[in-house]
Amino acid sequence: ARWHIRTDGSPADEVLFGTPREVRWDDWTVQIPIALAQRAHDPPFPVVNRDIGVGANMLVPIAAPVLHPVAFFRPTFWGFFLGPDVGIAWLWWSQVLGLFTVWFCVLCTLTRGQVGLSIVGASLLLFAPIFQFFSFNGAPAAIYMGLAWLAAVHVLTASKQSALLASGCLLGWSGGCFALAIYPPFQITLGYLFAALLAGFVVQRRTELSLRVELPTRALACSLALGLAATAGALLWSDARDVVEVLRNTEYLGGRC
């Protein structure tokens, strides 16, 4: 609704209660306009957008839709390639529905299929202030971490070659997505959670796991995962190395490394 004030001054008729405030303005006045600016650029979806400042690299630090292999690892922006309205709707609902669905599956796995408890847990997570107040900015990292955990569990438990290879590919893709959701305060915390949940799962199911079954295929699945995740990092580094070097030498709530 604050866009009305900045664009045409028309009344914000969509507001039913309360008053629009200048809260979380970096979402609606920076991130979404940058995504829309990518589509409006000639040619559209460039790596370097000449319409922003003296030219801004769109790979980092703020994710945006870019015609670049990195886009494969940033699924929340795929909708912008179909249109601006689809892009905004996709950006929002892929995070809302993705967060609920992925963590419902995680909780179902942890609770051995207790659907009701898993629905309650996923709903509480969806409506947690950290996601609601930050306009779901932290949701992609949480979604990718949950997907990676589910894939890792299937690499540990699957017995068919096709399932193992598919799980390895999912683990690598979601790991690459997680690596490119660049915000260390979320990534480090979720990394600890991933390790804790996976260790807990192994301890819980230690008598049920048969890791020696299809061991070569299981190892190949892990190699696929590592290769895909490393590819994501290499793709970003290849075309954003100079920007990363600038970011490493900035001060924002402490020195970066």
Image (cartoon, helix red, strand yellow):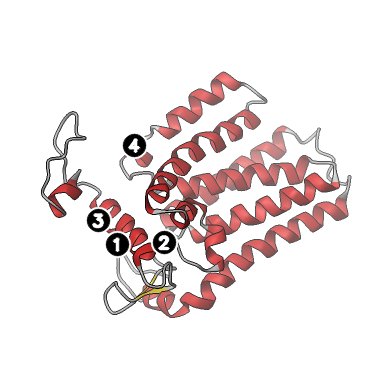
Q: CA distance from mark 3 to mark 2?
A: 14 Å
Numbered mark located on residue 64 in the image: 2
Whichever of callouts 3 and 4 sits on the residue coming sooner in the sequence is 3
The structure residue drawn at horizontal position 13% and vertical position 49%, both measured from the top left corner, is: 5
Whichever of callouts 3 and 2 sits on the residue coming sooner in the sequence is 3
Spot occupied by residue 116 in the image (x, y as percentages of width and height):
56, 19
Q: CA distance from mark 1 to mark 2?
A: 23 Å
Q: Which residue matches tag 3?
A: 29
Q: Which residue matches tag 4?
A: 129
Residues at marks 1 and 2 touching, judged by CB atoms closer than 8 Å: no
Secondary structure beneath dot 4 equals: helix
Q: CA distance from mark 3 to mark 4?
A: 21 Å
- Circle 4 Cα neighbour tier, 10 Å, few/some/many (<14 / 14–19 / ≥20): few
The structure residue drawn at horizontal position 33% and vertical position 55%, both measured from the top left corner, is: 32
Q: Amino acid at mark 3?
A: Thr
- Circle 1 Cα neighbour tier, 10 Å, few/some/many (<14 / 14–19 / ≥20): few
Residues at marks 2 and 4 touching, judged by CB atoms closer than 8 Å: no
Q: Amino acid at mark 2?
A: Ala
Whichever of callouts 1 and 4 sits on the residue coming sooner in the sequence is 4
Q: CA distance from mark 2 to mark 4?
A: 25 Å
In the image, residue 145 sits, relative to residue 52, either above or below, namely: above
